[in-house]
């Protein structure tokens, strides 16, 4: 569950701290107040790609922190453990966006975008303003269908992907072997030369940085020596003129005075420590001086070594580490090319075997998808009825395309395949009576797409391991009794997960357990966004405003208060398991 979101210099937000709780939370406010910016900021904290355009004008960087409770996110906790993160019931995802790049932290420790995203995907599922548009693209439909499968279905997907990956690697190997022998020999000669040249240089990681530092010391030998000598003389001095001797005198006096006034005891202790540190510094300087040796020949050696490294950098990389990485990659390619001499016949037999295995797994997966498609269609139709689509019909087509180079089935026919299987999945919809089923992308309006997506999220929520779901204006293009049905659907989803919903509809906002208002104001010459959790009285005024009424009109406020009371009863009924009423 998302506990807190901290935002600084992000888009129009100067500084903001949003504290959240369980259940259904509505974010409301005027159009353009900045509600969606909060979702953008959460997306940034979860590792989604974002540009430096989000840095607030006049600032040099933006920062976002999302604090999650891990008690309801076992998958995220497991992933955090896998990356070596100590997370005691809580995890903080931090991202700093500077010009040109981002910096990531997990619980204050430096991290990578990959780790942030790997953990974040188990913490929150964000349905953005236009995510329902992904339903238009049929390339996503197979993934949507698979997301409704249980553990057995996911196991079939995993087994097929393992078989496909093995087949893909074997096919790539065959293509590699088929490369013209002369080209392969030329490539081997080049790679062997590169490996030999790098190996002969006997490079060490970060050697160039160490040599540059050593060159600086050698070139400034006299300045370093004179400076250390002068500093050492200041500490030791002659007779009683050195800093150390003066500190000892101060220490002695302080110790005598402390016998008179105990308050000076700490001062005496501080001076004892100061004397010790000064003596340590003097010893270190003396050791440094004794180790110093002017060596003009060493300067020449360092310069020659740096020139050698510079020559290799021009060919293989911008640093010694990149040069060594290039060497390892070249050696790996050499190994692959040399081992490619195995017989083509043997590889062809292996590929044929792998194709049969992958084909068998693809058939089982396809059978599971067809069975899943029927169940999903029935469930979606049932869930759409209370959302103002009482007579809508929904179907899931699972088809395959013949391909002579594809995967074979048990009867020897071959089907086009990719990493997801042989199936082409298409969602079909008839939104109104008398209309035939047609591709969802061709017949659904924006509001209908939103409702289908909400249905998918609702069906998935009970089995989801993601504790936070965000809906950014899922109520687009709906209203009236349909809005009430959508509100009940969101309440039902919030029984299994924390739900954040940006909405402009009072019918939805009044069903929230908590309501947060986002407002925009001008302070001086800058725009400032404020976020406030509303009290019950404030909610009444905000619901009245959302109805288009004056928040000071008594009738409007009474109507808003009644809506809130009725919504509270509805929440209790829905969460108790009562089926939502039909629209």
Image: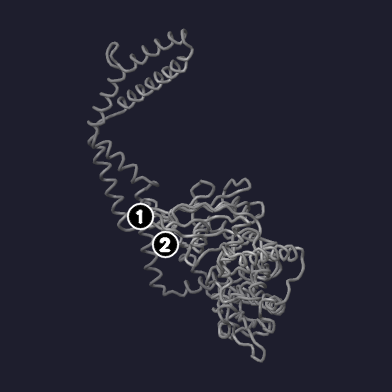
| Residue at the (77%, 66%) spot, across then down | 577
Query: Residue 315: x, y in percent?
Result: 32, 58
The picture quadrant where one finds residue 164 is bottom right
Nearer-N-terminus badge (1/2): 2
The picture quadrant where one finds residue 517 is bottom right
Q: Between 573 and 185, which is closer to the camera in this rendering?
A: 573
For the rendered model, the colour scheme is: one colour
Q: Quadrant of the N terminus?
A: bottom right
Q: Eyeballing the image, is 335 above or below 296?
A: below
Query: Residue 110: x, y in percent?
Result: 48, 48
Residue 146 in sight here: no
| Residue at the (63%, 76%) spot, across then down | 480
Residue at which label 1 appears? 58
Left or right of residue 399: residue 331: left
Q: Between 460 and 521, which is closer to the camera in this rendering?
A: 521
- SS at mark 2 in the image: loop
Q: Quadrant of the C terminus?
A: bottom right
| Label 1 vs label 2, nearer the camera | 1
Query: Residue 394: x, y in percent?
Result: 66, 82
| Labels in figure, total | 2
Residue at which label 2 appears? 51
Using a 10 Å C-alpha cutoff, classify the residue at mark 1 as few (fewer than 14 neighbours), some (14 to 19) or many (20 or more). few
Query: Residue 430: x, y in percent?
Result: 64, 86
Spatial CA span between label 1 and label 2 = 16 Å
Using a 10 Å C-alpha cutoff, classify the residue at mark 2 as few (fewer than 14 neighbours), some (14 to 19) or many (20 or more). few
Left or right of residue 175: residue 317: left
Q: Eyeballing the image, is 466 above or below 129?
A: above
């Amino acid at each position: 569950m998302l506990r807190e979101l901290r935002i600084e210099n992000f888009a129009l937000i100067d500084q903001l701290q949003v504290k959240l709780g369980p259940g259904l939370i509505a974010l409301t406010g005027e159009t353009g107040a900045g509600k969606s910016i909060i979702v953008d900021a959460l997306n940034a904290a979860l590792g989604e790609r974002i540009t430096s355009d989000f840095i607030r004008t006049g600032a040099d960087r933006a920062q976002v922190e999302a604090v999650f409770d891990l008690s309801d996110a076992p998958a995220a906790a497991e992933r955090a453990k896998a990356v070596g993160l100590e997370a005691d019931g809580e995890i903080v995802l931090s991202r700093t966006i500077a010009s040109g790049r981002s910096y990531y932290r997990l619980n204050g420790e430096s991290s990578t975008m990959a780790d942030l995203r790997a953990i974040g995907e188990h913490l929150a599922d964000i349905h953005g303003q236009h995510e329902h548009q992904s339903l238009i693209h049929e390339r996503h439909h197979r993934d949507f269908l698979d997301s409704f499968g249980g553990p057995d279905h996911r196991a079939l997907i995993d087994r097929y992907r393992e078989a496909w990956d093995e087949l893909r690697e074997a096919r790539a190997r065959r293509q590699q072997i088929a490369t013209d022998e002369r080209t392969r020999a030329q490539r081997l000669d080049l790679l062997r030369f590169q490996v030999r040249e790098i190996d002969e240089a006997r490079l060490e990681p970060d050697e160039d940085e160490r040599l540059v530092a050593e060159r600086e010391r050698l070139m400034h030998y006299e300045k370093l020596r004179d400076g250390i000598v002068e500093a050492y003389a200041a500490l030791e001095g002659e007779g009683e003129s050195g800093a150390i001797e003066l500190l000892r005198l101060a220490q002695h006096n302080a110790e005598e005075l402390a016998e008179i006034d105990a308050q000076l005891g700490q001062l005496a202790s501080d001076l004892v420590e100061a004397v010790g540190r000064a003596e340590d510094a003097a010893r270190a300087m003396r050791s440094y001086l004794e180790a110093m040796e002017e060596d003009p020949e060493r300067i020449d050696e360092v310069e020659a070594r740096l020139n050698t490294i510079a020559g290799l950098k021009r060919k293989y990389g911008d640093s010694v580490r990149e040069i060594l990485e290039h060497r390892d990659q070249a050696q790996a390619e050499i190994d692959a090319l040399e081992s490619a001499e195995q017989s083509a016949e043997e590889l062809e037999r292996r590929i044929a075997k792998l194709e049969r295995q992958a084909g068998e797994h693809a058939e089982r997966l396809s059978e599971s998808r067809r069975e899943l498609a029927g169940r999903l269609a029935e469930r979606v139709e049932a869930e759409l009825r209370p959302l103002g689509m009482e007579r809508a019909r929904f179907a899931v087509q699972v088809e395959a395309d013949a391909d002579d180079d594809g995967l074979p089935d048990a009867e020897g026919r071959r089907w086009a395949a990719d990493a997801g299987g042989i199936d082409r999945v298409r969602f079909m919809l008839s939104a109104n009576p008398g209309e035939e089923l047609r591709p969802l992308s061709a017949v659904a309006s924006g509001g209908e797409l939103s409702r289908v997506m909400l249905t998918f999220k609702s069906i998935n929520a009970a089995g989801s391991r993601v504790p936070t779901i965000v809906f950014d204006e899922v109520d687009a293009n709906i209203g009236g009794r349909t809005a009430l049905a959508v509100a009940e659907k969101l309440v039902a989803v919030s029984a299994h997960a924390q739900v954040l919903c940006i909405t402009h509809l009072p019918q939805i906002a009044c069903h929230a357990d908590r309501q947060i208002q986002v407002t925009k104001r001008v302070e001086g010459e800058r725009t400032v966004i404020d976020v406030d959790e509303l009290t019950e009285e404030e909610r009444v005024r905000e619901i009245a405003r959302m109805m288009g009424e004056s928040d000071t009109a008594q009738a409007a406020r009474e109507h808003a208060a009644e809506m809130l009371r009725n919504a509270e009863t509805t929440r209790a009924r829905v969460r108790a398991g009562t089926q939502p009423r039909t629209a």
